[in-house]
Image: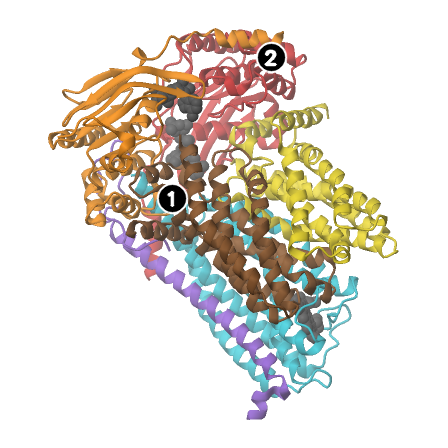
Chain colours: A red, B orange, C brown, D yellow, E purple, F cyan
Amino acid sequence: MPVFAGSELTCLRGDRLVFTGLDFRIGPGEALVLLGPNGSGKSSLLRVMAGLLKPFRGQLSWDGVPVPDDPDGHRAKIHYVGHLDAVKPVLSAVENLTFWANLGGAPDPRASALAALDRLGVPHIANVPGRYLSAGQKRRLNLARIIAAPATLWLLDEPTVALDRAAIALFEGMIAEHRAAGGMVALSTHTDIATPGARDLHLDDFTPYHDEHDEDDMHEEDAA
Amino acid sequence: MPVFAGSELTCLRGDRLVFTGLDFRIGPGEALVLLGPNGSGKSSLLRVMAGLLKPFRGQLSWDGVPVPDDPDGHRAKIHYVGHLDAVKPVLSAVENLTFWANLGGAPDPRASALAALDRLGVPHIANVPGRYLSAGQKRRLNLARIIAAPATLWLLDEPTVALDRAAIALFEGMIAEHRAAGGMVALSTHTDIATPGARDLHLDDFTPYHDEHDEDDMHEEDAA
Amino acid sequence: MTRFLRLVARDLRLALRQGSDATIAVMFFVLCVVLFPFGVGPEPNILARIAAGVIWVAALLASLLSLERLFQNDYEDGSLELLSLSTLPMEAVVLAKTLAHWLVTGVPLIVAAPLLAVLLNMDAEGFGVLVLTLSVGTPILSLIGSIGAALTLGARRGGVLLSLLILPLYIPVLIFGAGAIDAALNGLTPRPHLLLLGGLLAGALPLAPWAGAAALRQALE
Amino acid sequence: MTRFLRLVARDLRLALRQGSDATIAVMFFVLCVVLFPFGVGPEPNILARIAAGVIWVAALLASLLSLERLFQNDYEDGSLELLSLSTLPMEAVVLAKTLAHWLVTGVPLIVAAPLLAVLLNMDAEGFGVLVLTLSVGTPILSLIGSIGAALTLGARRGGVLLSLLILPLYIPVLIFGAGAIDAALNGLTPRPHLLLLGGLLAGALPLAPWAGAAALRQALE
Amino acid sequence: MSDFFAMGGYAAFVWPAYGVAALVLIGLLVATFKTLRSSETTLKALEGSRPARRRPRRNDAAATSPKVGAAEVGEG
Amino acid sequence: MHRFANPARFQRLSSAILPWSAGATVVLLIVGLYFSLFSSPPDYQQGETVRIMYIHVPAAWMSLFVYVNMAIAAACGLVWKHPLADLFAKAAAPVGAGFTFICLVTGSLWGAPMWGTWWVWDARLTSVLILFFLYLGYMALVNAFDDPQRGMRAGNVLLLVGIVNVPIIKFSVDWWNTLHQPSSVIRMGGPTIDGTMLTPLLVMAFGFTTYFITVVLLRLKAEIVQRKIQTMRLTEAQG
Ligand code: HEM
Ligand SMILES: Nc1ncnc2c1ncn2[C@@H]1O[C@H](COP(=O)(O)OP(=O)(O)OP(=O)(O)O)[C@@H](O)[C@H]1O
Ligand SMILES: Nc1ncnc2c1ncn2[C@@H]1O[C@H](COP(=O)(O)OP(=O)(O)OP(=O)(O)O)[C@@H](O)[C@H]1O
Ligand SMILES: [Mg+2]
Ligand SMILES: [Mg+2]
């Protein structure tokens, strides 16, 4: 069974060091919960994990094989859910979903799209165009995407935003099922999501003390 | 002393009836707090009060004189704070503020801009360009705008979004001071803002009964 | 009045700080004109014959494209809402923003035009009239364009839609502008054309801010 | 491969449902050409002489303007991010979106062009070559434009900036496109020009998706 | 000497050529110096207004850390 | 500038080079001007107008040289993400645009007496004009983003795409028959130009090169300072 791990990760955004010296490891059936205040780098870490952001230092690997050696294999193994819902206003929910299921390699895209909508408790929106969906419905559609096509590792950035209690419960069930089948999950959150046996990663532990040391040094050199 | 009142207000957005038969009255030193779930029409009512939205029915008046009879006088008496902060990224905080103070008729715009920034606890951002300000700082800048130039009635739409506890306390002080000087306030909020002696207006009391059947109906229509 | 000037000053400051809004419009103008020798071929006398028309068409398009975002930023960041709530009339707001826009993008076009006329081999007699027609014509373009910019505020595909609305209205300006230059080049007096252009300006000056203000009020609802 | 076609199909469906993207590009094309008789004057032989160049320049500008939003919507709603995480290579994504865009906006231009040629009094001998050059040329325009659209993703002042970047790169297409028609009208063979256009297409076909993909990756960081 | 300035009748072409070159090169140099100067003074002013060094940035420290007015200079 | 790409070393290096390159620029340009204006003979065909060549040709070479350098830096910036490479391209662009402008204007000023026209639409002239627009487009693109790094990365891609124009400029005179004369210095089989003209040409070319080095170093310094300012502002604003 595969293990996804990162070692000595450093992330730089603009000229700002977001985190440094960060290690993590996710084995089959495990879940990693990213915690930390606003701006501590949860979204950044998830984007690094997805490969959307290159880490400045450090490396990601699957079973010891670095991700840059097999980027296609990495992409085939992950699902990423960000802040944006990628819902086209002129396509119906099922059309939206079928496209992504197809791209993700589902054998019967339309059937699995309908099943996924059902699983998230919104079968009735299947033929409603995206523009008429409420924020919560859009979010459910986006979460349906990750079960419409299979993938080992789910990377979820604040997945429960805009969801009501009933939807959160469904979603927690989805995660438990995925983990029971040997899947892996990394998610960030500000609220409580029930993920029994998950490991917590506090991002603020890796945020550097921010000394202006280097800048001042450079300045002194300039003056000299 | 002036009284601002609305009677039998009905608001229509698109084809949706947001509220109907709504009356309110704000006297000198009084505050009106608008409450209600998402989509109940708080923002719509504030925009109607500001004159940005024409009510479908009903009328607003100052001391019995209808607002449409003296729109300029109405505009001179109000300050409106919406969801958007109107901060120009390339102008410094004090330049941004000075412009609005000037437009609002402050006698010495730059001085009152600096004083307002001070009052909101952010004198140090005066020369920082808008693009470097965090969400909370932008919000404080926007709130500084309403004390940089005087006006009788403040219309505030969720003013404490993005503010931390210290800033909320400063802001509550500002409101108390404004009311003590005979000013009037109408504000909407989802959280707690201390406004002693304020009247509450529950918007959902005026929202017509809204059945959720339409989505399912649409679905059936599409399928048919 | 002073508040009107304040608004103009603010817009100018924004344009200058924002960098190259002005430069980009004038560069599009130059590029657009420069395309023609490639398309039509390098024969000097053909180029000279069509120079006036080409420069005017390019000015139209450049003005159009740069107008696309006239109210956009203020609309998106909420400033327009606040401006509409100030005691400055909405018509004055439109006029102030149009004036600032013309100063930033129209004036550079007027300056660059003689250079392009040289590139296209236009006779030197035409230069004075070219500059004159552009000086009267570009404000009209800005004024008419401001109506379009206000109308398309918040629509998807603003750019192309704007051009459909505005280009037909630009045609009279084009006819008189290019006509005046052709007249001058053929030894006739450009006076009637220039007078007509002046008439258009006199008409657009009150009408455009009024229509623009009405459109903005709709957009803000 | 089938996923590539799926993406093309989705983009076509979006364009058709969204309504009038295609119509607006072709209308801009027509309007742009129609401006010239007003600017240059109605003399038939002058118009005929410049027809090829004017039509090609208008095609350039129309293609440019409609390309502005090629990746914009997918970027703003997060679809582009997800596409880049799919196993479809980024180059294929760029190519698919460009292809769909060309089908929606380029093909109508080709259809409308002979009509405009009639309007501008072009000789009938030129029609065939006009359509031929546009058929080879507009895909090149779409390909080159896709690089610009990717580069300016998220920039302030997208539209005018795009034109500044892309118009210089369009110039060779314009030269050979208009050159072929002129050759045909003058009784020469347009073959060499057409071959060069074909060469440009062969060059742009691998290069543009590569550069576009590189630019998109930068934009998504 | 006047022969030299006349450039064999081509003075109107030769001298502008040298003039434009000089203008552009000197102009670029001056502009470069100006931006360098102004950004250096901005930097000095910014650094002067921040006496505290190695101040730890903790999320709760934001409210307590002393702030002084920033530089008077605009964007470089 | 972040702590991992050490600009201090660059600053030391540039302070060491600057006085030398500045000195060399002054000396070379004075010598070059003396040669080109006084000690070289007028051409038997072109008369005194040949003196325009000593500006025109070095400027033309520089316009290409600077662009190629920028493109190389862009490739380095994209591959190794070295911030100095990005900054180099950004700092060099205005200088390259300046040389291109000089080439265009002096060419026109030369063309007026020699060809009887300020401008013709031939391949050489046109491709130089496109190069000028590429420079301007690059500068506009780099400054069009709120995040300066994003701008520089987009600019790098543009520089690499635009490199196709360079061989077109260089060989336009050989591929198409143009009014413009073909290469006589940088060509296969060695220069065919007379020594009395070659010397001032080369001296001026070296002078322009050292000028370029000097100005780029200064601009790089300014860019680094500006990056520092921005970082400080950001941290200050974010508290
Ligand atoms: C605006 C107009 C002009 C432009 C854009 C232009 C551009 C150039 C360029 C790019 C080069 C460098 C070629 C290389 O490195 O191989 C060059 C070289 C040269 N140009 Fe021009 N040129 C222009 C007008 C003229 C005119 C009017 C003349 C003289 C009648 C002229 C004479 C030369 C000569 C003698 C060289 C040196 C060729 C060599 O020996 O390598 N140019 N020009
Ligand atoms: N595109 C960007 N360019 C530069 N800096 C960025 C960018 N996006 C985020 N940052 C910075 O990187 C840091 C980490 O941001 P990130 O979005 O990862 O935080 P987060 O933990 O997800 O916060 P939140 O809880 O608000 O989602 C912040 O300081 C932010 O200002
Ligand atoms: N521009 C618009 N066009 C049409 N309908 C709109 C528009 N804006 C809002 N609505 C609808 O009007 C209703 C009231 O919206 P409003 O923004 O006033 O609610 P609110 O009480 O402020 O909600 P929230 O708590 O989310 O701010 C909602 O049902 C919304 O869907
Ligand atoms: Mg986040
Ligand atoms: Mg609201």
Q: Amino acid at mark 1?
A: Glu
A42 to F216, vertically: above or below: above
The residue closer to the viewer here, F191 or D58, is: D58
* Subunit that carries the residue with mark 2: A
User: Quadrant location of ligand 5?
Assistant: top left
Q: Quadrant of residue A33?
A: top left
Would residue C136 appear left or right of D179 to someone viewing this image? left
Do we see residue D61 in this rendering? yes
- How far from the left and from the top, in percent, is residue C183? 63, 65
Q: In the image, is C188 to the left or to the right of B17? A: right
| Co-location on one chain, circles 2 and 1 | no
Q: Secondary structure at mark 1?
A: helix
Which numbered tag is attached to residue C91?
A: 1
Q: Report the chain holding disc 1.
A: C
Residue labelled with disc 2: A113
Q: Residue at x 77, y 41 (%)?
A: D135
Count of all numbered marks drawn on residues in the image: 2
How many neighbours does mark 1 have within 10 angstroms: few (below 14), some (14-19), or many (20 or more)? some
What separation in Å lies between label 2 and label 1 (alpha carbons)? 52 Å
